Image (cartoon, rainbow, N blue to C red):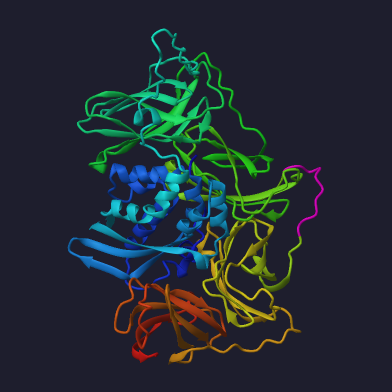
């Protein structure tokens, strides 16, 4: 099935939502063009979107096939759903031949999960159970050729191999549908049992004939390079004949397809047609029913020249009549909750899998929708996702959200609110947001709107945020969206009782006028009572970035009866100024650890600009952590230090700032500091 794509609610994405705070979490010398190019590559890789990947640079057929195979594997999707990336702008190198930048991808340890799993479900459960501190890192180097302001990736195969080789490749082999491998009958000759001359051989059973539609020869697309004929539909999929009129080999891949106005969402295709020849190509899919006659066909196939991408293009065909005797019967069902010039969105039902929608593509081009937030009866669904898909021109697609929290399918639906991200080819791949404020589905349903749990520690006209309590995985926070639009609430930093949470993760979409309960993932003492809470939150409206803002919370009282003593930093004091004290703490296998005491009322971000341990670089080093106001936070430069030799000296450069410029950017250079 098409790979599940989670919202990239990671550091990079969330920061781009802040308008004036935009860019990656490394400030400095990167041009916006390079940053955008690197972001495009990484988002295409993590979502395993061949279409988007091909637009970023050069990839061999084998590399694209590897990405395509990964897209079909739910086990790989479970890992990549949780993947985040960070661009190290200080690593940028520019030469006459081009430029390069390093990117660190953080994702679950699939090798560890694979060791503990006997089947795919156990693997997915093992990945889901990993905490971020157990995640692994993959270091990538992206190399670009620069032509004026255009950046083209030149080492695509290396990047794909580095990210999807090793453990992920083993996961895909264990659980995925591997394309391009020979079938069992191709690998091994059929086994036969010797028959004595006087015995009558037992007849070999034959497979029943495949269900098939009528056979046609209807041209659905034609230009001076390619002619595409539709032939038939059977249990293998949708069959075409492609006349390649060009002087180069073409690879045919499918972007979208619909039969009689019903979109096909689960398919695979990558077939070659030699130069100047005709060949059959098949969009492999499984249909619930094989119709005898086909009324109309719409979709989009990619014509790809892997040797020269300038020859590649999209062949789109909109509602081509195959058999005029067939009366189209596809109609949307349910309650219409949104409409514009491009799409109609219908709420259909609630099931044990999730919320079911039907989406109608009203255009002559593909439409790619993505659910970002949905609330039923005022309760926000945590992290809704569905399988990434493109809806063929003038067709209807049924899409089911998936989510981490459970849904009671017997719940009567009174109201719904939601936000969709729509990518439309008609708008040059520009994304827009479809906002669905609270809409009545059934006026006869009586329900009690959910109450916001916990103690409110921040409130404005847009949002309320509460402290519900602590769990072993991190604090539990409540969020109420008070607006008519979907908003993102993200913690830039967080502290409990003045102790900062290392590498806290809290970044969620919330549906209009909904109440949510979210986990702020990070290490805490779950047995503690919460006296004060501090940090910084970004409130972001993805549809209107100019309205995004950050709030700093300087140890707001949650429970006045709890006595809170200021924590003490530990280690060797390396630096002190009016904003921070920085202490060297220890060297660990995965990095160099510091305690940072934030002396200000603002959330501070600390990043590294290079480090030497005992005069030696400890591999690729990355640090970009935020510290809550008036707190002590443990931070770590992620790297590969030599732990066999005691650390005696350290040289390190830090950058210190706040994202909204409350504390202006400055750098601290420390040379040969004694730590042994």
Q: Is residue 509 visible?
A: yes
User: Which percent across, then down, holds residue 159?
Assistant: 32, 55
In percent of the image, x 38 and y 33: which residue is there? 301
Residue 231 vertical placement versus 315 (above, below) = above
Q: What is the quadrant of residue 495 in the picture?
A: bottom right
Q: Is residue 665 visible?
A: no
Q: Is residue 225 left or right of residue 432?
A: left
Closest to the observer, 200 or 567: 200
Q: Report the magenta residues as a range.
A: 441-450
User: Which percent across, then down, holds residue 377?
Assistant: 73, 51
In percent of the image, x 31 and y 77: which residue is there? 617
Q: What is the quadrant of residue 472 in the picture?
A: bottom right
Which image quarter is the C terminus in? bottom left
Residue 567 vertical placement versus 458 (above, below) = below
Residue 364 vertical placement versus 662 (above, below) = above
Q: Is residue 4 left or right of residue 339?
A: left
Residue 90 shown in magenta:
no
Q: What is the quadrant of residue 629 in the picture?
A: bottom right
User: Which percent across, then down, holds residue 169?
Assistant: 40, 49
Q: Is residue 237 left or right of residue 99?
A: right
User: Which percent across, then down, holds residue 554?
Assistant: 61, 82
Does the magenta stretch mainly form a helix, a strand or a loop? Answer: loop
Residue 444 shown in magenta:
yes
Residue sitting at the far left: 96
């Amino acid at each position: 099935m098409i790979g599940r794509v989670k919202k990239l609610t990671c550091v990079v994405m969330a920061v781009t939502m802040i308008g004036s705070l935009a860019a990656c979490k490394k400030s400095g010398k990167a041009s916006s063009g390079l940053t955008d190019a690197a972001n495009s590559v990484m988002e295409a890789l993590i979502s395993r979107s061949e279409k988007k990947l091909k637009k970023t640079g050069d990839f061999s057929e084998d590399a694209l096939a590897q990405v395509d195979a990964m897209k079909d594997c739910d086990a790989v999707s479970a890992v990549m759903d949780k993947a985040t990336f960070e661009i190290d702008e200080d690593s940028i190198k520019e030469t006459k031949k081009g430029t390069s930048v390093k990117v660190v991808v953080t994702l679950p340890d699939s090798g560890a999960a694979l060791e503990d799993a006997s089947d795919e479900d156990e693997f997915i459960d093992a990945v889901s159970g990993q905490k971020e501190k157990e995640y692994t890192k993959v270091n990538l180097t992206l190399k670009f050729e620069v032509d004026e302001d255009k950046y083209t990736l030149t080492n695509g195969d290396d990047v794909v191999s580095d990210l999807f080789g090793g453990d992920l490749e083993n996961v895909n082999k264990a659980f995925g549908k591997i394309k391009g491998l020979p079938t069992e009958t191709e690998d091994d000759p059929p086994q036969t049992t010797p028959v004595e001359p006087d015995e009558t051989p037992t007849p070999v059973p034959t497979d029943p004939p495949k269900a098939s539609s009528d056979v046609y020869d209807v041209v659905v697309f034609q230009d001076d390079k390619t002619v595409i004929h539709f032939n038939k539909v059977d249990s293998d999929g949708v069959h075409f004949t492609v006349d390649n009129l060009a002087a180069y080999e073409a690879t045919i891949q499918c972007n979208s397809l619909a039969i009689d106005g019903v979109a096909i969402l689960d398919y695979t295709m990558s077939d070659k047609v030699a130069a100047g020849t005709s060949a059959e190509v098949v969009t492999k899919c499984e249909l619930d029913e094989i119709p005898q006659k086909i009324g109309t066909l719409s979709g989009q196939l990619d014509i790809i020249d892997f040797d020269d991408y300038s020859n590649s293009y999209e062949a789109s065909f909109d509602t081509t009549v195959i058999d005029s005797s067939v009366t189209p019967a596809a109609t949307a069902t349910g309650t219409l909750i949104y409409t514009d010039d491009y799409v109609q969105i219908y709420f259909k039902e609630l099931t044990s899998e999730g919320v079911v929608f039907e989406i109608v593509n009203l255009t002559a081009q593909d439409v790619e929708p993505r659910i970002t937030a949905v609330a039923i009866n005022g309760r926000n669904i945590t992290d809704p996702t569905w399988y990434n898909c493109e809806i063929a021109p003038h067709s209807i697609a049924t899409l089911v959200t998936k989510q981490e929290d459970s849904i009671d399918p017997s719940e009567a639906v009174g109201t719904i609110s939601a936000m969709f991200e729509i990518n439309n080819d008609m708008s040059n791949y520009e994304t827009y947001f479809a906002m669905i404020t609270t809409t009545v589905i059934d006026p006869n349903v009586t329900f009690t709107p959910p109450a916001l749990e916990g103690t409110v520690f921040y409130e404005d006209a847009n949002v309320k945020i509460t402290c519900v309590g602590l769990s072993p995985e991190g604090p539990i926070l409540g969020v109420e969206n008070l607006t008519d639009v979907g908003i993102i609430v993200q913690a830039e930093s967080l502290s409990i009782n003045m102790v900062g949470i290392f590498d806290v993760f809290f970044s969620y979409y919330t549906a209009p006028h909904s109440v949510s309960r979210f986990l702020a993932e990070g290490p805490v003492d779950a047995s503690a009572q919460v006296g004060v809470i501090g940090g910084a939150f970004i409130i972001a409206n993805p549809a209107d970035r100019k309205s995004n803002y950050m709030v700093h919370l300087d140890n707001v009282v949650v429970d006045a009866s709890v006595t809170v003593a200021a924590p003490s930093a530990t280690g060797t004091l390396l630096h002190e100024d009016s904003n921070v004290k920085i202490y060297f703490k220890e060297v660990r296998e995965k990095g160099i650890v510091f305690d940072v005491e934030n002396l200000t009322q603002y959330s501070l971000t600390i990043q590294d600009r290079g480090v030497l341990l005992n005069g030696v670089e400890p591999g690729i080093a990355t640090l970009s952590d935020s510290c809550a106001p008036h707190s002590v936070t443990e931070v770590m430069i992620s790297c590969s230090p030599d732990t066999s030799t005691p650390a005696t000296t350290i040289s390190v450069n830090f950058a210190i700032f706040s994202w909204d410029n409350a504390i202006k950017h400055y750098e601290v250079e420390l040379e040969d500091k004694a730590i042994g």
